[in-house]
């Protein structure tokens, strides 16, 4: 989603109290930035922020951080916050390839990827947010036992994402190729902007929930051995 340059968006984002400026300085101190000890969940490539806004309203015991690289898009999320400020939601305007400079080891409890850009040309595969290169970044910042949730209507991107898991050391615990007809995975589902648009056009939505393979094996061994 690239809105045409919105005049003044850089200044608005640069001065907003809801956007953390020079986010690298907060690395390792995100809970302090929220003033509590609640877990941190992030959405990478959040767009206009509908999903995170709804999540933050419904889950005040979780701190949410939205990451979006374009000021012209982030601006829309700020407008929602100005109407209804939420103490457990912050934004960062950055490229996600720099996540490790902004979050310390294990600082994040959950990562959401929603309707990530497909980058269809093979030579740009490493720019896809569920690629093995990004999974390696998520591995650095996600706490032990932490998970990634990915939704998309783009079947080719989803197939690619599933294939990336094993070589990158991740295992799917739940997977659906038609989320909106999957009663169990739909429980508590919050629709994103793109999800509303594409599901109302009749596109099936794919979703996975993945854990590091080592965490997954350990949990399964524990549950089978009692
Ligand atoms: N997650 C929203 C949804 O589901 O409605 C928006 C989806 S939109 C297709 C993808 C968004 O991710 C765009 O706003 C884009 O600018 C952002 N994005 C893509 N790659 C990114 C990156 N490397 N770092 C930060 N944002 C990124």
Image (cartoon, rainbow, N blue to C red):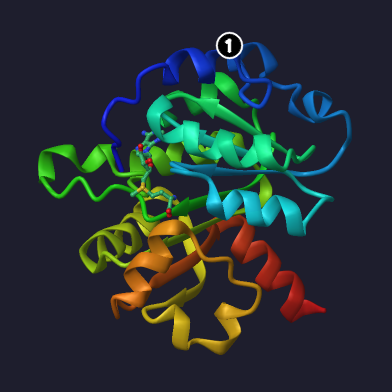
Residue 1 seen:
yes
Q: Residue at x 58, y 22 (%)?
A: 102
Left or right: residue 209 compared with residue 118: right
Percent coordinates x, y for residue 88 in the rendering:
76, 40
Q: Nearer the viewer, residue 222 or 69?
A: 69
Residue ID at (57%, 36%)? 79
How many residues crowd mark 1 within 10 Å: few (<14), some (14–19), many (20+)? few
Q: Taking the image as four quarters, which one is ligand 1 found in?
A: top left
Q: Residue furthest right?
A: 36
Q: To which quarter of the image does residue 183 belong?
A: bottom right
> Can you say whether 57 is above or below 39 in the image?
below
Image side of residue 154 versus residue 212, left or right? left
131 over 161 or under it: above or below: above
Residue 199 percent location from the top left of the image: 36, 74
> In the rendering, at what x and y percent does residue 149 appear?
52, 59
The quadrant of the rendering that contains the C terminus is: bottom right
Q: Is residue 70 visible?
A: no
Q: Residue at x 29, y 25 (%)?
A: 5
Using the image, determine if residue 79 lies above or below residue 121: above
Instruction: Depth check: give the residue in front, 52 or 125.
Output: 52
Element marked by disc 1: loop
Q: Left or right of 216: which side holds 113?
A: left
Q: Position of residue 204 (x, y in %)?
A: 33, 78
Q: Which residue is mark 1?
A: 22
């Amino acid at each position: 989603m690239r809105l045409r340059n919105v005049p003044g968006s850089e200044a608005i984002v640069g001065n907003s109290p809801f956007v953390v400026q020079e986010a690298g300085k907060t690395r390792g101190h995100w809970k302090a930035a929220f003033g509590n000890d609640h877990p941190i969940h992030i959405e990478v490539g959040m767009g206009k922020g509908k999903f995170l806004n709804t999540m933050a309203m419904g889950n005040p015991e979780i701190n949410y951080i939205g990451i979006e690289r374009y000021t012209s898009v982030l601006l829309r999320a700020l407008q929602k916050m100005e109407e209804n400020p939420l103490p457990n939601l912050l934004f960062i305007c950055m490229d996600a390839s720099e996540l490790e400079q902004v979050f310390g080891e294990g600082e994040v409890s959950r990562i959401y990827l929603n309707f990530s850009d497909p980058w269809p040309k093979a030579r740009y595969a490493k720019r896809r947010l569920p690629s093995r290169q990004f999974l390696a970044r998520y591995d650095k910042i996600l706490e032990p036992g932490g998970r990634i949730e990915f939704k998309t209507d783009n079947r080719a991107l989803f197939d690619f994402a599933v294939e990336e898991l094993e070589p990158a050391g991740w295992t799917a615990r739940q997977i659906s190729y038609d989320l909106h007809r999957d009663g169990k995975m739909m429980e508590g589902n919050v629709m994103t902007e793109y999800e509303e648009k594409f599901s109302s056009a009749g596109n099936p939505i794919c979703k996975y929930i993945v854990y590091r393979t080592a965490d997954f094996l350990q949990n399964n061994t524990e549950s089978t051995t009692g």
